Image: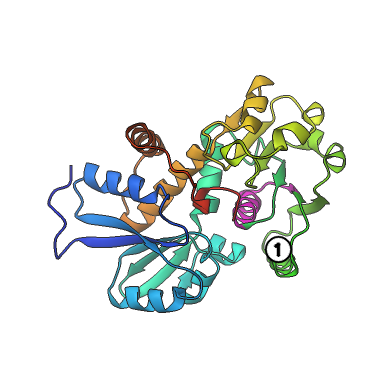
Amino acid sequence: MRAATVNAKTGIYAILGDPVSHSMSPVIMNSAFDRLGMDEVFLALRTGVETFPQVMDTLRMLELKGYVFTMPVKEAALAKMDRLSEEAELIGAVNCAVFRDGVMTGYNTDSLGFWSAVQERGGSAETVETMFLLGAGGFARAAAAQAALQGVRRIVVANKRGHTAFMESFRQFLQRLARRCPETAVTVLDWDPALWIPELPRCQLVVNATPNGMKNVGDLDEIFPWEAVAPGTMFFDAIYEPQVTRFLQRAETLGMPTVRGLDLLAHQGVCSFRHWTGVSVTAEQMRQDVLAFWASHTKPDAISKEHTGGQ
């Protein structure tokens, strides 16, 4: 349990974004601090893009020790970093930062957590040559970047055409990815399941990085061309509400290995905690902390976009 009550020397960490009231980050981080008897506390601070620069300047002066950034401030956080990790620079977004010795270092634990969750279920660059990615938002870019950095040779992206600024941001990401990982080929398809059919037999990992299926709203499980998928293909869904989406339920019915959004949430937490403290905690413990919280509290009506494809 916590070594002492919150006091004048307690280290402070925070998640910034809007919304943040339903984020699970305070649950998993404070549970870990308490379990380890660390004199640290993690807060949720609602902050939009307009106020973000002023808020960060103030918090930096107050010397908060670490941050999680969620929508819509992940890209805005880039400008407030003194240093960037390789994956954060490649993705063009920061969702975790460490403030130490006057230096703010930005990371992207979307990407690190994604690949760790895949590895936990048996995936690797040796078993995944081609990844099929549904969506092109913030989490999709993180997943694509980390897969390429790990050595995945081909990525197929299926996405609905978005507004001009979104598509330009995605185009710039693909340019950075091509420069950093020239050996990884990227194919972009429209949101048309008929176009996916020729690609799916060659894919070993299918990732839903869209909000389709959140709270059982959406039709991805119905429109996906299941008949084209090769046996043993791994399915990943970034959504954790519900814990098992209809998309994953269908995959499991067909005997496919699956990775859940709760797995991603836990592995993101492990990465952030290690960046901040140098202490390794387990993804399983963080999963159990979330499940225990859900069991003792009413589940939120709205789910934070921090750990879903809806970014």
User: Which residue is at 42% across, 49% downward?
Assistant: 22
Residue 207, relative to residue 234: is it above or below?
below
Residue tagged 1: 170
Q: Which residues are magenta?
A: 138-157
Q: Where is residue 294 drawn, in percent x and y?
A: 38, 35
The part of the image, by quadrant, that contains residue 215 is top right
Q: Main secondary structure of the magenta part?
A: helix
Q: Is residue 308 left or right of residue 136?
A: left
Residue 1, relative to residue 63: is it above or below?
above
- Let me know if residue 51 appears in the view: yes
- Let me know if residue 204 appears in the view: no
The part of the image, by quadrant, that contains residue 183 is bottom right
Q: Is residue 140 left or right of residue 154?
A: left
Considering the numbered disc 1 on the image, is that residue within a helix, a strand or a loop? helix
Q: Where is residue 5 drawn, in percent x and y?
A: 13, 53
Residue 28, relative to residue 288: is it above or below?
below
Please tell me which residue lies in front, 23 or 67.
23
Amino acid at pointer 1? Phe
Q: Where is residue 56 drawn, in percent x and y?
A: 39, 74
User: Which residue is at 60% across, 36% downward?
Assistant: 216
Count of all numbered marks drawn on residues in the image: 1
Q: Which quadrant holds the N terminus?
A: top left
Q: Residues within 10 Å of mark 1 (few under 14, many from 20)?
A: some
Q: Is residue 155 magenta?
A: yes
User: Which residue is at 68% across, 64% downward?
Assistant: 173
